Image (tube, rainbow, N blue to C red):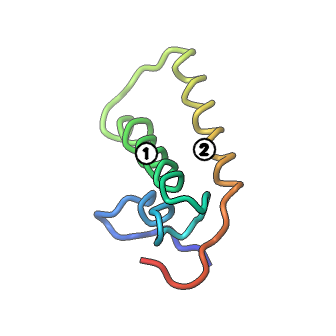
Amino acid sequence: DLIIYSGPKRPYSDHLFRPLTGRLIISEYAAEQDGVHLLFRGVIQSVRNPPSHKKLHYSVLEAEQAVGLIDYLLSLLQQTTLREGKSS
């Protein structure tokens, strides 16, 4: 089973995509894996978190761009494989 909770201080993206220990593998190359890791972490910090802390107003274009970015991230998730064994 894939468990995504990783504790209160560690972002989910670290648990899922960290090179060598992340639960999901997107690439056999550590630099590419880290790039996806940082992409997911950045989206969480810059797109998901701000509306949780304050009221934001997006233009239609900004909303469409955010949805497009999230759609791309979902397509990356479909390309992952689950890492065998226990990871940290």
User: Which residue occupies the foreground of this view, 29 or 68?
Assistant: 29
- Point out the image quarter for the N terminus: bottom right
Viewer-nearest residue: 18 or 69: 18
- Image spot of residue 50 (x, y percent): 35, 36
Amino acid under label 2? Leu
Between residue 46 and residue 14, name the one nearer to us: 14
Q: Residue at x 58, y 34 (%)?
A: 69
Looking at the rendering, in which quadrant would you find the C terminus? bottom left
- Give x and y (percent) for residue 78: 71, 54
**Residue picked out by circle 2:** 73
Q: Splitting the image into 4 quarters, where does residue 83 fall?
A: bottom right
Q: Is residue 4 above or below residue 40?
A: below
Amino acid of disc 1: Ile
Task: Examine the rendered structure and indicate whether residue 25 appears above or below residue 86.
Answer: above
Left or right, 84 with respect to 38, comes to right
Bin the neighbour count of mark 1 within 10 Å (Cα to Cα): few under 14, some 14-19, many 20 and up.
some
The residue tagged 1 is 44
